[in-house]
Image (spheres, rainbow, N blue to C red):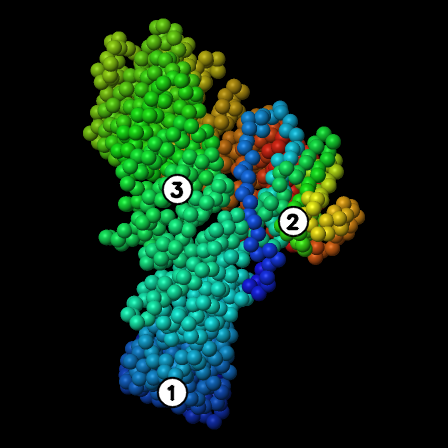
Amino acid sequence: MAADNSVLLGLVEEFVSGQVDSKAAETSTGVKNGQFTILQLVEALGVSLSSSQPQTRGRGVQLLSQVLQECYSSLSEREVEVLLAFYENRLKDHYVIIPHVLQGLKALTKCSVLPPGSAVSVLKSIFQDIHVQSLMLAERSCVYNILISLMESKEEELKGLGADFIFGFVQSVDGERDPRNLLLAFQVARNIIQRGYDLGKFVEELFEVMSCYFPIDFSPPPSDPRGITQEELVLSLRAVLTGTSQFAEFLLPLIIEKLDSDIQSAKVDSLQTLAACGLTYSHKELAEFLPGLWSSIRREVSQTASERVESAGLSALSALVSCLSRSVLNSDSEDVLQVFLSLVLKDCQHHLCEPDLKLVWPSAKLLQAAAGASYRASLIVSAAIIPALLEQYNNRTQCAHRRTLLEVLQGFVQPTALSRPADGEDSVLVAFQQSLCGVVFSALTESSAGLQVTATRVLSALGQQPGLMAQTDVEKAVDHLSRLILEEDDPKLSSAVVECSGSLAHLHPKAFISRLIPRLKEEILSGQSDAAVRQRCVTALASVSSLPSVVQESAPVLLQVLASAHTGSCGFSVEEVAAVCISLQKIAEHARDSEEIGRFFHDIIIPHLLGLCLQAALQTRDAGHSSPLTDKAVLSAVVPVMSTACAALRSESASRMAAQAVSLFLDGDVSFLPENAFPSKIQLLQSQAESGGLSQLVCLLMACVCSLPRSVEIPEIDRLLLQLEDLSCTCTHLFSFTSAAKCFAGLVNKRPAGEALDAVLERVMKRISVELENTSSAQRTQAFTLLLWVSKALLLRYHPLSTALTDQLFALLSDPALGSQAADGFGVLMSDCLDVLNRGCHADVRIMYRQRFFAENSTKLVQGFNSAEQEKKSCYLKALSHIVSNLPRQVQLTELPALLPLLLEALSCADQAVQLSTLSCLQPVLLEPPEALRNQLEALFSRLLALTTSPAMKVRIASLQCVHALSRLPEHTVLPFRARVLKALAVPLDDKKRLVRKEAVAARAEWFLLGSPGGR
Amino acid sequence: MSGGTRLENANPLIFQRSGERLLTATDEDEDVADPIDDREIFDILSKSINDPEHPLSLEELNVVEQMRVNVNDRESMVSVEFTPTIPHCSMATLIGLSIKVKLLRSLPDRFKIDVHITPGTHASEDAVNKQLADKERVAAALENSQLLEVVNQCLSTRTM
């Protein structure tokens, strides 16, 4: 004990007289592990604490405070009481001691065992003895922290202090300037307001001391370690100011005043604060200021050039209105909401009668914001506005006017989340239901496409609200839509009509089944209409088919179209047939959400499609007559229809699908196909000569079996794989052997790892190597294609063999015959394939396989490039640009420094495809350029500017876009190039192609603004 | 635009914007030369110059119309007539200057550029036309950094 005492005395001595700061830490460790007690420490400090020298006393208190900061949690209530009394007393001491006293108090107030009454006495002493604002930054922060901890632990006691507490706080915070302390002060004030402290007569004082910071204008120093943002300060001050309605009488005039400010952020902040008030205030506080607030909001919204101010103004208005809507009506007072809205209506309504003047839109938006704030508000506003708009519409004759009026009307028709009628309430528009429908139908018959487009939007909005369209109206609407589909050829209008039909068909399927579909069917199959009309009908059929009942009507129509295209009766072109398939695919996408649609595709559509294609292929072989269904563009369009539908099949029908497809292709089992008139023993997977005829149908096999869920077992898979391998290696028809390779890859990708898979892979790799090594072989391209797709299948699932395969691809880059194809192969490897091996087809695709591939292989590529002969280099560059342009942007940015020299090389490579793909991968990077680029600007500029006169138009355009993007780099880095760029860009201004000139004009304009006053 | 200042013309007429120029097959054909035409110059002017008072393009305010833009590519001539929103518009010279500068920056230098006010639409039409036609005065105006600043602001792409 005695030894401990002497140790402690030694520590104290060294800290106080020896000025060794580290001893404080040692002392607190000693206290913490029980070597000494606080009492012993105080005793040991005795001499220093009672010294006549303020510096010595200060040192003593500092040591005690620092120890307390470490050990406050282990103190007993008695100890705390004594220490508090000591510290409170020290607050009266010399000014050099005060900082340490406050530190000690801060530690003590964090104790959980504060004796009753201590909080009040601590605060009284602080407020009495200390002038907070003459303290330093850190001490002021101590005071705020003491307040915060006491508010947490001793709320009841502080509330007992009543207004004295508020007064004390107001006095201590008055004049605070540091943002860090302000955040603390705002927190104290927010606690005062939200936890229901009695503000007494100091409401205005508290408001004044807080509101002097409003609106906050703070730009943090560039290297601010605390990272306080303007946003943080704004939000915490706003929470204080809008926290209580007692501030209303002071805050609202202040907001009106600040809205007059010239600074945009002040305006936005004021409007947002006002919107926040709407949540806490009631109409009583607002009533007096409503006219002033309204005129400010109106002025801001109608005059501003900034969307931020406009949207802040609109949400402030909407908050005010919803606040007023919440107010409870007294029998004797007038309805404040009604009064306010009539003010709004008076100021805005007449602008709606001038549809060609600028203020029509701000006024409409204001009215819509007010109407959208509550159901009651929308009732009041609609009652006044809708009849007026309808009347205006009927009085005006110009299409442009009518269109504006209808666009305005559209904003009122669509209810917001707040103004949506509750259960049992009618839509506010019920009263105008008939006249609204009348106006929409009349607009649909106008000659102006813009007006008609707007009318379709209003129609969709009306159709989506229950009770606004009677059955007859729906039928009329459907008739109008069918007429527009058949007659109007404006692209914008037709897409609007199609979209509108889609949204209405979802709610009123019957009308579409009975009226629209038969009419379109008749038109398509009549054989008299032109291709554009038929195309619109087909698109419309796809867009209305989202419900099973509609699909069962519309999809057979499309099938019928394909059938008649096959027989050649209506003269459909190949493009049209492909477009029909695209529409079928859009319908098939709904199978994901509805099992019924999936089953319908499985039972009817897919067998029919397969049957049609097979018929077409057989007919071509036998009779020489060529059906569009044998064209590979059409077959490629049929593939996604089947694969989308198959991907959505549930387990049982999926297995059935697999079994049927496999038995058809392996054994020629045609029993499940409709109109069974096929010869038996068709051999679909034999490589027939030349034309490909039957063998190209292998793409349909791929569509059926490669997109099924992974859990589905494919029957006879080994025989199937062997046949596919044969077909892909021996067939001479490009489309057939590529499809076979893809199908093989799709199956391999999903096959579970194990001996069976290893055996298949070993066999196929051997076969590929043999074919490739034999440079005179006629089947090298086939072997390469199979290699490519198998590599992709394995790469996607991180199979260990994938490296061996991709290495083979790298080696082929220097092959004289296959080099260029191999380079393009890397594009296939890295991009998403649309018909197979993607996530939609349930393929095994690991995340970030591209990054992994790049990380493992980029060095190989660079080495290969460096050691290749001059004329082979372009293949490497092409491969590189394929790989890089498919990487995610984040990876591109990090990898660019290493690759930049190579990419710059690629820009000067003569191959235009390489130039183009390099430019397209550079351009997004240039928008946010990495540091490495800064050192290469000279080289980059000279290559880009040279390409602006390239013979290929696409290269010129892409290079100009890159030059444009470079103008956004930091000014000091690119300013040196300004004169040179402007001079070089003068040439493409006179380019013979307009699209090039457009880019040149845009780029040159930005470069002129660079570094020029008022530019940027 | 602060709340206090009043605009010269607070509620101007707004005109509908023409749509994007439709892309034709020849636009994408490498071998066909597309001459510079009225619509092209109109697009350059209407989409990229803002009115100094309103956040609106010159097209929406009908200051520039396609029928008042005349281009002759073969003779390298461009003539643009613009119509101030009100006859006493104090911004007329500035708008004219902005149009002129935009054309100077966007056209090959073989073109002769003529910018003037639509006859009968502005009180001091002649004075403004004379200023815009005088090469040296235009050059001198652009030496003035304050004026250049305002012109550049009109020509900056809209940021909201």
Is residue A61 positioned above or below A723 on the image?
below
Q: Left or right: where does residue B26 sit relative to residue A115?
A: right
Closest to the observer, B61 or A144: B61
Q: CA distance from mark 2 to mark 3?
A: 36 Å
Q: Which mark is residue B84?
A: 2
* Labels 2 and 1 share a subunit: no
Residue A30 image offset from top left, x and y in percent: 35, 77
Residue A702 image offset from top left, x and y in percent: 33, 23
Name the secondary structure under disc 1.
helix
Q: CA distance from mark 2 to mark 1?
A: 71 Å
- For label 3, the crowd category at 10 Å Cα-Cα, with few meaning under 14, some 14 to 19 and many 20 or more, is some
Please identify, in this view, whether the residue under mark 2 or under mark 1 is nearer the observer.
Answer: 2
Q: Which mark is residue A439?
A: 3
* Labels 2 and 3 share a subunit: no
Closest to the observer, A26 or A875: A875
User: Mark 1 — residue?
Assistant: A124
Asked if the residue at tag 1 contacts the one at tag 2, i.e. Cβ–Cβ closer than 8 Å, the answer is no
Circle 3: residue type: Val
Chain bearing tag 3 is A
Circle 1: residue type: Lys
Chain bearing tag 1 is A
Residue at figure coordinates x 47%, y 55% from the top left: A350
Name the secondary structure under disc 3.
helix
Residue at figure coordinates x 53%, y 57% from the top left: A304
* Labels 1 and 3 share a subunit: yes
